[in-house]
Image (cartoon, rainbow, N blue to C red):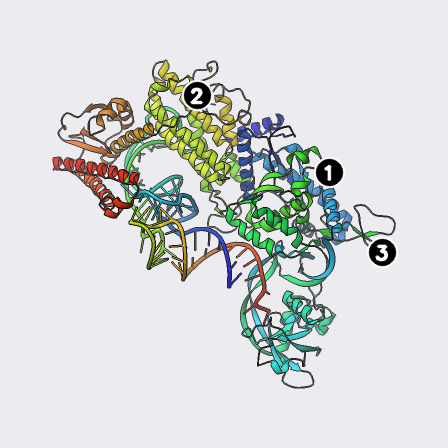
RNA sequence: GGGCCGUUAGCUCAGCGGUAGAGCGCCCGCCUUACACGCGGGAUGCCGCAGGUUCGAUCCCUGCACGGCCCACCA
């Protein structure tokens, strides 16, 4: 450990191996205390991990390590999700590149290929999680489609079926033409697309003017089974009850009255296509209309469309519009923007399609989840996500769970002729055929916290680890996944599957845009780790992960974090350089310090140290990594390194003895304590450093996690020392500022004279601090102002530094002028308060007293500056 | 249409009732032996707009504007 620069790669590799060999993250059921259990949001086996995963898992790892350091038994379960449509799409792309497709391959062969792909992909993903430093219990690896999970899925399906909560029926569903499958409502995203509103003339049956409907989807008109108008619309009232003819095919449909229709929109007349529009479907239900399919599952027009049969939706629209126009049916075409549903996996436009699907009834399942939220058994962090979560549960609709793809859990229902279907994992016997569909991938995901512990078997693991503690995930799957886990967990076991959900934001690119392959703005976490080290990437992400907020990811932040890692490394290097080769028996302990005799820098840093550890703990308890990171960063860099280490140097370089040992003790203890506090955020460098420091701290644990957080031997908080040190710091800064602004070379040692109300005490006790840090040669109490001197005014103390022949006094006057202006601005602000009778009458006493002190101080400062300026003129 | 979040230094973002903060960037000076992945110093802000509450508001309340996200059946 002597390199000037920390080299992460070899350290990380060695530690990953060491942790795993020591089974450091292994958890088994044991007596006493509830464990802190977390299940990983299983990444889809679609490829490699992205920065979003890095954030999600870094957060979980931070929380898990934090709990372990607090002494809690913790368990973090790894695994992957088979990822249904998403994964099948990846494979289909591969096949396409090979100029073939899944149908040519056949179901069996296709699934075999999927298995091979899955195996490789899991390996990649879990390897990446290892590299990220994730303290997962590797022996618990689970997969949503492995044998144990398949049993859970079957059991869940059967139980819901038996309770009458699963049914099969022909409904209007969201159909993705490209993926060739139905989707649930929440798998449909809305996108604003430019289109047109077409005004189309429908003639009256038997002659007559008829009416004009307005539609964005003329190609669906072959599926029309009515035209609807508002019952209160005087324009169309006479038409109600008559019949109009669909252009080209001349099929007659009734004009009906339904209050769903808006007066103002379009022409006030709506063509009703129950088989291809949700609203039309509902109107159809109310009026007992037939649902005619004009578009098939392949996205092409059906025989209903007569001459247009076989055309794709898109081509049909163009053709129909052209023909309408040619034949004089098109009365008007206006630009129209409307939100259309698109597939969340492939972004092609969703076709509402009438088809036979499996559904899970939701209303009944949602109630316990609502109750758990309302009575606080389930908490969402940050809390503002609770409302959208709640609203969704309240307005929940039945969940379409069947998918017309191959990759997934096959629906365990078997059919034979007209017999009643049988729910079974295996074939019930000869002649039975299984349902061709598979279950929505989110069905198995919803069971994840149950299934990873062997449920529905009553395993010891399940008894011990379920329910879990905290779930960490992004807000984009709050409904898709979080809500469904709550529903399932409560439905099957009567307990919330996790008591807390931590909802984080999305990692976006530098300019705030969502990362996507097509935009080419994706950040590869592996590349970041290669360049800057894992700790740097983790720290950069965690330091920006404010609850629920998106992160605009800039590589610069990783570089800053890398610098911070190096800062920690070098402070350790410095401390080690100043320690004897071998640690004393029992190490350096704070308890051995002569408390009463500690010098200011020590009392101060211990006070700050204690406050910082408390702050970091509070923030991590509340899942706020950014605030914890900031507190530790500021403490280590701006307090420990910038001031305390500088002040300790004198003693460390001096003769052996009690003073040196005190300095060593404090440095060792504070550094080890800080490093442990940082460990959840950056496990590698802290582990590495701990190994070389622990003996000096009198610790024998092999790894940080085994040692637990540093416990303080007593209360080191010391407001007086903090106040006094602030004075020293202000004094040093003011002299440094003077030097810098007047270009006094750093190696030129200055002789100074100090005066002021606190000067006596400050000088006497802390003479050495100011002398050392401000580059003074001598510092004498004020007896008389030396002639031709520059002046540094800090709060409560004024330094006069003779500099005749060194500096330009015109410049000094200028500088003092700036200082004076600042002082006067301060006074003005404070006076506005102190001279306000209302403030004096109504503000709390402490505030008034404080303001008066500030006022006095500022005035003293101003007077000092004025006097000095006068002397120089 | 409903809801949520944001609007603070050039950029990215903290702070959320008592004289405006960080990181990066910028300017000046330093290889001062832990660290140039560093050290010292400096500049920069109508804290979105308008009202209100308060002795006092960047912070609380109400409107408004702009941006983003989620939900939603105007074809």
Q: Secondary structure at mark 1?
A: loop
Quick check: marks 1 and 3 in contact, CB under 8 Å?
Answer: no
Badge 1: chain ID: A
Mark 2 surroundings within 10 Å by alpha-carbon count, few (fewer than 14), some (14 through 19), many (20 or more):
some
Residue closest to the far bottom: A207
Residue of label 2: A576
Quick check: marks 2 and 1 in contact, CB under 8 Å?
Answer: no
Q: Which mark is residue A695?
A: none
Are the numbered discs 1 and 3 placed on the same chain, yes or no?
yes
Q: Nearer the viewer, mark 3 or mark 2?
A: 3
Q: Is residue A710 above or below residue B22?
A: above
What percent of the width, then of the height, locates residue A167?
Answer: 74, 56
Tell me the distance, in whole angstroms, between the alpha carbons under discs 3 and 2: 80 Å
Residue of label 3: A419
Total count of labels: 3
* Residue in view at x 22 percent, y 42 percent: A827
What percent of the width, then of the height, locates residue A17?
Answer: 60, 28
Q: Secondary structure at mark 3?
A: loop
Residue of label 1: A457
Q: Secondary structure at mark 2?
A: helix
Badge 2: chain ID: A
Mark with earlier residue (2, 1): 1
Are the numbered discs 2 and 1 placed on the same chain, yes or no?
yes
What percent of the width, then of the height, locates residue A228?
Answer: 63, 75
> Foreground: A354 or A852?
A852
Q: Is residue A583 above or below residue B28?
A: above
């Amino acid at each position: 450990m002597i390199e000037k620069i920390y080299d992460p790669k070899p350290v990380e590799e060695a530690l990953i191996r060491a942790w795993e060999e020591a089974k450091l993250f292994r958890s088994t059921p044991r007596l006493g205390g509830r464990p802190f259990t977390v299940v990983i949001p299983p990444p889809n086996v679609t490829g490699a991990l992205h920065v979003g995963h890095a954030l999600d898992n870094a957060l979980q790892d931070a929380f898990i390590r934090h709990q372990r350091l607090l002494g809690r038994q913790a368990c973090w379960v790894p695994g992957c999700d088979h990822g249904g449509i998403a994964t099948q799409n990846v494979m289909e792309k591969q096949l396409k590149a090979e100029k073939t497709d899944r149908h040519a391959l056949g179901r069996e062969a296709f699934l075999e290929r999927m298995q091979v792909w899955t195996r490789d992909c899991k390996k990649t993903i879990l390897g990446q999680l290892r590299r990220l430093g994730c303290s997962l219990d590797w022996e618990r690896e689970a997969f949503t489609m492995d044998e144990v999970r398949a049993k859970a899925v079957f059991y869940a399906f059967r139980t819901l079926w038996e309770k009458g909560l699963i049914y099969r029926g022909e409904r209007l569903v969201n159909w993705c033409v490209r993926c060739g499958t139905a989707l649930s409502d929440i798998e449909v995203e809305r996108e604003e697309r430019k289109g047109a509103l077409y005004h189309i003339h429908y003639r009256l049956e038997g002659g007559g003017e008829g009416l004009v409907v307005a539609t964005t989807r003329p190609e669906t008109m072959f599926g029309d089974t009515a035209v609807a108008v508002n019952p209160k619309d005087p324009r169309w009232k006479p038409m109600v009850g008559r019949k109009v003819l669909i252009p080209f095919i001349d099929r007659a449909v009734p004009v009906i009255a339904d209050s769903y229709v808006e007066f103002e929109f379009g022409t006030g007349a709506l063509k009703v296509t129950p088989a291809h529009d949700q609203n039309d479907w509902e109107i159809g239900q109310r009026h007992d209309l037939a649902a005619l399919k004009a578009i098939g599952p392949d996205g092409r027009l059906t025989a209903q469309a007569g001459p247009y049969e076989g055309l794709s939706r898109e081509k049909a629209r163009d053709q129909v519009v052209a023909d309408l126009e040619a034949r004089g049916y098109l009365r008007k075409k206006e630009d129209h923007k409307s939100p259309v549903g698109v597939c969340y996996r492939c972004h092609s436009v969703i076709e509402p399609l009438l088809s036979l699907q499996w559904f899970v009834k939701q209303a009944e399942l949602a109630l316990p989840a609502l109750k758990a939220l309302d009575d606080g058994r389930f908490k969402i962090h940050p809390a503002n996500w609770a409302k959208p979560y709640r609203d969704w549960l309240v307005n929940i609709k039945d969940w379409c769970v069947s998918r017309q793809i191959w990759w997934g859990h096959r629906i365990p229902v078997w059919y034979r002729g007209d017999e009643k279907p049988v729910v079974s994992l295996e074939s019930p016997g000869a002649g039975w055929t299984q349902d061709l569909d598979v279950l929505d991938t989110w069905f198995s995901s919803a069971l994840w916290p149950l299934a990873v512990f062997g449920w529905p078997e009553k395993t010891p693991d399940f008894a011990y680890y379920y329910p879990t503690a905290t779930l960490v995930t992004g807000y984009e799957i709050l409904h898709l996944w979080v809500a469904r886990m709550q529903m399932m967990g409560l439905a099957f076991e009567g307990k919330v599957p996790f008591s807390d959900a931590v909802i984080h934001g999305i990692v976006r690119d530098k300019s705030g845009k969502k990362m996507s392959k097509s935009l080419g703005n994706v950040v590869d976490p592996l590349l970041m780790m290669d360049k800057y080290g894992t700790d740097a990437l983790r720290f950069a992400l965690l330091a920006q992960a404010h609850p629920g907020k998106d992160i605009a990811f800039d590589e610069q932040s990783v570089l800053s974090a890398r610098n911070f890692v190096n800062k920690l490394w070098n402070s350790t290097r410095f401390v080690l350089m100043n320690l004897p080769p071998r640690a004393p028996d029992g190490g350096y302990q704070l308890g051995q310090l002569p408390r009463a005799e500690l010098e200011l820098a020590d009392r101060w840093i211990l006070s700050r140290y204690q406050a910082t550890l408390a702050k970091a703990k509070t923030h991590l308890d509340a899942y706020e990594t950014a605030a914890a990171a900031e507190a530790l960063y500021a403490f280590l860099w701006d307090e420990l390194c910038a001031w305390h280490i500088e002040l300790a140097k004198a003693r460390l370089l001096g003769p052996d003895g009690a003073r040196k040992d005190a300095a060593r003790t404090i440095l060792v203890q504070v550094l080890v304590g800080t490093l442990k506090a940082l460990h959840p955020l950056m496990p590698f460098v802290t582990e590495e450093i701990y190994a070389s420091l622990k003996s000096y701290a009198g610790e024998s644990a092999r790894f940080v996690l085994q040692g637990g957080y540093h416990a303080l031997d007593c209360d080191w908080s010391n407001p007086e020392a903090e106040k006094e040190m602030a004075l020293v710091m202000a004094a040093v800064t003011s002299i440094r500022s003077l030097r810098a602004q007047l270009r006094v070379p750093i190696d030129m040692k200055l002789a100074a004279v100090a005066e002021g109300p606190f000067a006596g005490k400050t000088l006497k006790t802390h003479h050495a601090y100011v002398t050392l840090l401000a580059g003074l040669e001598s510092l004498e109490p004020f007896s008389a102002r030396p002639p031709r001197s520059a002046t540094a005014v800090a709060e409560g103390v004024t330094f006069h530094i003779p500099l005749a022949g060194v500096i330009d006094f015109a410049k000094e006057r200028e500088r003092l002028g700036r200082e004076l202006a600042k002082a006067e601005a301060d006074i003005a602000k404070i006076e506005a308060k102190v001279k306000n009778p209302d403030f004096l009458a109504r503000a709390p006493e402490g505030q008034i007293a404080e303001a008066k002190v500030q006022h006095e101080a500022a005035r003293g400062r101003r007077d000092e500056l004025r006097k000095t300026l006068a002397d120089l003129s």
